[in-house]
Image (cartoon, rainbow, N blue to C red):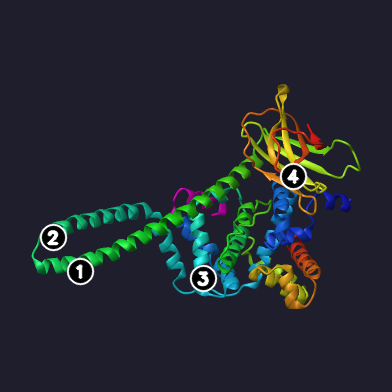
Amino acid sequence: MSEIRQELHIVEEDLVLYALGIHSDARLHGITAHIALCTLCRAQLAAVDRALAGWSASQLTGELPEGLRDRAIARFRAEAAAPAQQVRAARQKGILLGRIANFRESLTEPLPFQIAAGALIILLAIVGWDDFRHIFEIRQVIHQSQRFQTEALRMESLEAFLHGTGGVSVTMHPRMTEGGEPTGQVLFSPDSGQLLFRGENLPLPVAGKTYMLWITPLGGKPPVSVGICMPDSKGNAAIILPKIPLSIQPLSFTVTEEDAAGAAAPTGPVVLIGQ
Amino acid sequence: MTDTQLLEAITAGDQTAMTTLFDRYGTLAYLTALAVLEDPGQAEDAVHQIFLTIWRQPAGFSSRNGSLASWLVIAVRNRALDIRRRTTRQELLENLLVAEPRNMGRTVEDDFLIERIAASSNALSQTQKDSLTLAFFKGLNTADIAGRSQTSPESVKASLCSAVSTIRKALEA
């Protein structure tokens, strides 16, 4: 029984390394995909997390440094008041523009004032450069924030998909039962167009070839490409939330062997099929 | 007030609830970060970042009812390791942490439980303790730990696994 479990689920050693974040990158993607699909392994991972958190808590002694609590609370309050600060910052920018307009008028003034104006030019150049640098930094932060936001949305979407109802779960098997080793699992929601695929024990395709997953819709429509699923050295492959059209009512899911560049329609031999 | 109620209050913008949450887990979070970073200033930064994340996106944690304490410890540890490595590789792991049936909200800081875990920790061999400390607090992989302890990565893997298994048994007893 335990042998069967080991074949179907992530073994404890791998879960521990995964929870510690020190698993080899080669299998990380496959393990993530499996955990996303497998309730049992998610529960096991949560138990490992809990053990690690509990163990680390038992190893720690000490207290908060003086003032840290106050600083933390001050930061929450500052964060809560952020919109008001943004308004103030915008107002400060308005003041800066006003200063530039006044400076242009001062160019018609006598020499001492022009010297003062020269000093002001230098000062404004420094301030301007500083502003420019800040704008550049802010743009970088915005870019980074957008990246995190996209990642967060993707994970939220994945979580909602996993907890949602109305999805289709399909287990795929080799079309020709040659030992029955390669397997695949698809979780698909026609309404949202979200899909998770996990393949196991897939043999490495011959050079110049790859595997592709297809959805064959109901009503005799042509198969829709889900994407390429190249297995790693252990035979694991995964496709997580690919971009596919909405409202496809699936008749079957198929993995075929195709040219490495991909194909617009399935042409190669069928490796896995499920409906 | 339970963690779930606290998170609901934080979602509603209640700053007092945020203060309560910090009072409940701030020390644990700080000590975890300090154990990883060994730098009080950086540890404080890591703690601020994690708590600000909760303040900004409390709804992201509501679905993990009852597991906030373990989430916090792992998240602070991962954030602290990120600060060390200057990488965001752990983001994915943070986001994938999942709910569990038992209420972790109070259990991690529960003295009795900590004592029980500490007792199980004493039962670990020195090799297991060292491996777990290097992997959890320093983020070293099995090859790095093996290099330090002059053993094989496979032995380290087995050592880590048996250590976690022992702690799990103590928790589930």
Question: Mark 1 belongs to which amino acid?
Answer: Ala
Q: What type of secondary structure mainly makes up the magenta span?
A: helix
For disc 3, the neighbor class at 10 Å (few under 14, some 14 to 19, many from 20) is: some
Q: Amino acid at mark 3?
A: Gln
Q: Quadrant of residue A273?
A: top right
Of B104 and A28, nearer the camera is A28
Q: Residues within 10 Å of mark 2 (few under 14, many from 20)?
A: few
Please name whichever residue, A65 or A187, is drawn nearer the observer in this view of the structure: A187
Q: Secondary structure at mark 1?
A: helix
Kindly identify which numbered label has been placed on residue B42.
3
The answer to whether mark 4 and mark 3 are in CB contact below 8 A is no
Comparing labels 4 and 3, the label whose residue is closer to the camera:
4
Mark-to-mark CA distance, 4 and 3: 39 Å
Q: Which mark is residue A198?
A: 4
C-beta proximity under 8 Å, tags 1 and 3: no
Under circle 2, the secondary element is: helix
- Could you give the CA–CA distance between mark 1 and mark 3, rounded to whole angstroms? 40 Å
Mark nearest the camera among 1 and 3 is 1
Q: Which residue in the protein does label 2 denote?
A: A106
Residue marked by disc 1: A119
Structural distance between the alpha carbons of marks 1 and 2:
12 Å
Q: Give, as a three-letter code, the residue at label 4.
A: Arg
Q: Where A216 falls versus B31 (above or below)?
A: above
* Residue B122 in view, yes or no: no
Hey, which residue is sitting farthest right in the picture?
A179
Q: Is residue B55 magenta?
A: no
Instruction: List x then y, in percent, for residue B68.
Output: 59, 56
> Residue at image x 69%, y 44%?
A239
The answer to which image quadrant residue A78 occupies is: bottom left
* Position above or below: A131 against A275: below
Marks 2 and 4 in Cβ contact (< 8 Å): no
Magenta residue span: B1-14
